Amino acid sequence: IFTFGGSTMWGSGARDEGTIPSLLAKELCKGKLKVKVINFGESGYVSTQEIFRLQLELRKGNTPDIVVFYDGFNEVYASFQNRQAGLPQNIVHRQQEFNLKNKFYPFGLTPHFNEILERVARKLLKENYPPLDNTLVKETSRVYTGNLNLVVALADEYHFQPFFYWQPTIFTKKVKSVEEQQITWGSYMSESFLKVTKEVLSSSDVQGLTTVFDEHPETIYVDWSHISEAGNALIAQKMARDIKLYLEQQK
């Protein structure tokens, strides 16, 4: 089983045994299944980058039986940050770094001077990006669902079963704990995520997990999108149930 996603799949804020892939393996082994779960999650990754990694593994002959994608927040944030869909996060840094050593900086300013100014400005301006307009909402959804179609085509060719999940965020939790209420987030990002979520769930076969914590008023989130190990366990349990059902149907 290959698992792909951003830092939430990689396991930020959790011990190795408390990540979603580790807990998924534990849940499946309870059912007497012999599984090997490989965590390909990477901080900041969007689905396009995840598909590149999957293709590289397939090219090497490393073919899985099952592939799990867990996305959402990074897809929206990349569009929110870049004002364009389909790009990875922080693309402006790559542009700034290109041919850096040959650039001239007058007055002895460092190459990162503009970046420093930008960081100061972001601290002063809480809402530093406007919400996604309807065109960018639809384009973000189109890019993501297009990536899903690419994975389905690869699955048909290489004979593996994909599972797609749209992750929950602090924006979608119905009842927040006292600690979660202290987590600050921009209303523009919240608005953008909710709009893209609605568009994605209405136009693709991805399974939405945005309500998975509705019956859990206790603290789950440590920030906008990263969750506790207890939260990871709930996500892993859902994925394990789906995988077990699929395997039962294959018998």
Image (spheres, grey):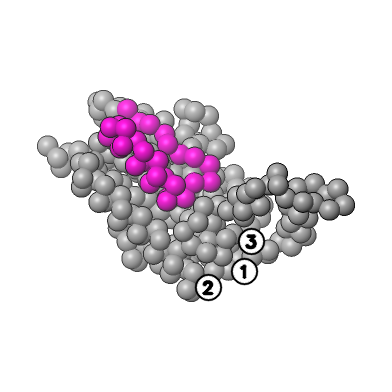
Where does the C terminus fall, quadrant-wise? top left
Is 223 part of what is drawn in magenta? Answer: no
- Label 1 SS: loop
Q: Residues within 10 Å of mark 1 (few under 14, many from 20)?
A: some
Q: Position of residue 27 (x, y in %)?
A: 34, 32
**Is residue 58 shown in magenta?**
yes
Q: CA distance from mark 1 to mark 3?
A: 10 Å
**Foreground of the two, 187 or 147:** 147
Q: Residue furthest bottom?
A: 134
| Circle 1 residue | 130
Point 84% across, 53% down: residue = 106
Extent of the magenta region? 36-63
Q: CA distance from mark 1 to mark 2?
A: 9 Å
Q: Position of residue 140 (x, y in %)?
A: 45, 63
Q: What type is the residue that disc 2 sits on?
A: Asp
For marks 2 and 3, give the CA distance.
Answer: 16 Å
Which label sits on residue 186? 3
Q: Nearer the viewer, mark 2 or mark 3?
A: 2
Looking at numbered disc 3 in the image, what kind of residue is underneath it? Gly
Q: Which mark is residue 246?
A: none
Q: What residue lies at 33% left-to-right and 65% top-to-bottom?
A: 203
**Left or right: residue 19 compared with residue 159:** right
Q: Is residue 209 visible?
A: no
On the question of residue 94 being in view, the answer is: yes
Q: Secondary structure at mark 3?
A: loop
Q: Determine which residue is flagged by label 2.
A: 133
Q: Which is more toward the observer, 237 or 13?
A: 13
On the rendered image, what quadrant is the N terminus found in?
A: top left
Amino acid on which disc 1 is placed? Pro
Instruction: For the residues labelled 1 and 2, say whether their Cβ atoms are less than 8 Å apart.
Output: yes
